[in-house]
Amino acid sequence: MNYDQLLNPEVLNIQPSGIRRFFDLAETMSEVISLGVGEPDFPTPWQIRKAGIQSLEAGKTRYTSNSGLQSLRETVADYLERKYQLTYDPLQEILITVGGSEAIDGFIRAVVAPGDEVIIPQPSYVCYEPITRLAGGVPVIIETKAEDQFKLTPEALKAAITPKTKALILPYPCNPTGAIMEKEDLEKIAKVLRGTDILVLSDEIYAELTFGGKSHVSIASLPDMKERTVVVNGFSKAFSMTGWRMGYACGPQEILAQITKIHQFAIMCAPTTSQYAAIVAMTECDEIVAEMAEEYDMRRRLIVDGFNRLGLTCRDPKGAFYAFPCIEKTGLTSEEFCQKLLESKHVAVVPGPAFGKGGEGFVRASYCYSTDHIKEALKRIGEFLEELNR
Amino acid sequence: MKLKLLKLLYKNSRLSLEEMATMLGAETKAVAAAIDEMEKEGVIRGYKAVIDWERVDNTNVSALIELKVTPKAALGFEEVAETVSKYPEVESVYLMSGGYDLTVIVKGKSFHDVAKFVAKELATMENVTSTATHFVLRRYKESDIQLCDRNSDDRGLYSL
Ligand SMILES: Cc1ncc(COP(=O)(O)O)c(C=O)c1O
């Protein structure tokens, strides 16, 4: 069979992830010190796991309603109000999804028609562009700049808007740059958007992880922005629950109703066990979440300081759990840097361009690792740089 | 800063002053001074490694002893506890609420060793009215560190 002719050309055209190659190479090595993953090292807090186990013991093993357990949606509503001053109606404006991933997919599929443009700031998480293409949409990339701390500027946004613009993706706190958008930054973006018909997908999956005393602000909490914004968030990062696959979308009932239809037919409902566990995560874990955030903050300082000492300029990442040092002065491309570092020192970091062309000259180093692990990685990177200079 | 510093030290006292200062966003000098001060005040009592002895030798044993004490005249709980604390065989001593008064953790080379110590030294002590000895069979967690887990990171090497 000639599969190339059988399969959907849109899917065939999607490039496999830029890290596949490194992954295969690293698999053949021993003693790899990885700073390569985008998920917490902390185990899911025990009381959350226990809630999952108890739900199984109690036989809660059936489908829930399509939108998710009502008690969970109410919990999410309370949580968002308490944390980010967002008010959503649990019955009509909140959908429980399979990770933030499904919420992102659902939003894009629900709003993007063929030919619609979706503005995507990069470097950023990798899913927005392929999903937009699958929906027949046209990704319009804005390359955010190191000198702007990788923030989205109103000027860049204005320049990207055309009559075909359907939506803006707002991926902050940002994987991989660690950039956040503070209230005044968001206010400038809101000013550009008010009075337009442009929708916003605000991916706030790292909202709990902001540092330096700056709490996360959601663009949906600014005047007139709720009506045009869908907030996506989830349990993976804040509660160390990546494998539970729990996320949610919140927004105007008119949009949520459409996303819910897609969800209903494609997914049915998010995993039931995980939904019960998620209630406990949001109601009983403030303290442990704060502790984990504090631990990340310390590791963040350690790794940023480490890179700067090694001469690799690293801005202070204000959110998420990644450092994004500049490796330009080595004279290597990001890919070369990562490959050579892996081959000679068995240290795994992700090349910046995996997150968009604008990531060239940078690498992403996750600090979801113990301090000893981070120290060992930095030591090896130091040796690597020294050997390069010889 | 002091509380955060203590937490950090409790978790890992082998970080350098510079590393701790970086992690806390403080000056190295300030961290050094705070540690000095807390050592002098007796807040910080020492720095130790948490060791899973089972992995090196199996011969040492320890036991938790419940002591019942009848405080008499000049010899209250405090005095008994202090006397008990002086023995090198004794690892920890706690005053308890509930059914008995002092928990004493005793270590020795063998069950016999520990039993002998309890019988000869603790049981015979003035004011001690009874002892109950519980031998430790296995340690699973010590000072916040799990001893039984294999420390495996089951995450992959890369993910986006
Ligand atoms: C920015 C961002 N959004 C969304 C996700 C998806 O997370 P999940 O589907 O586990 O909620 C990730 C995961 O790495 C991410 O980094």
Image (cartoon, grey):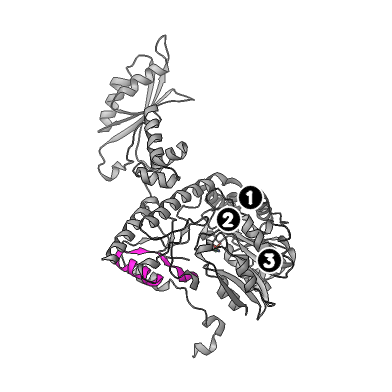
Mark 1 lies on a secondary structure that is helix
A326 above or below A160?
A: above
> Where residue B147 sits: x, y (%)?
36, 45
Residue contact at pointers 2 and 3, CB within 8 angstroms: no
Q: Is residue A58 above or below residue B33?
A: below
Which residue is the site of mark 1?
Answer: A83
Q: Work out whether residue A42 or residue B29 is closer to the camera in this orientation and state it.
A: B29
Q: Earlier in the sequence, mark 2 or mark 3?
A: 3
Q: CA distance from mark 2 to mark 3?
A: 23 Å
Question: Furthest-top residue in view?
Answer: B73
The answer to which image quadrant residue A88 occupies is bottom right
Residue A160 x %, y %: 62, 73
Q: What amino acid is found at the position of numbered circle 3 in the picture?
A: Val
Q: Which mark is residue A207?
A: 2
Q: Which residue is mark 3?
A: A192
Secondary structure mainly formed by the magenta segment? helix
Q: Earlier in the sequence, mark 1 or mark 2?
A: 1
Q: CA distance from mark 1 to mark 2?
A: 10 Å
Q: Which residues are magenta?
A: A332-356
Do the residues marked 1 and 3 share a common chain? yes
Element class at badge 3: helix
Residue A223, can we see it?
A: yes
Subunit ID for the residue under disc 3: A
Three-letter amino acid code at disc 2?
A: Ala
Q: Nearer the viewer, residue A352 or A343?
A: A352
Q: Are marks 1 and 2 in contact (CB under 8 Å)?
A: yes
Quick one: label 1 or label 3, which is nearer the N terminus?
A: 1
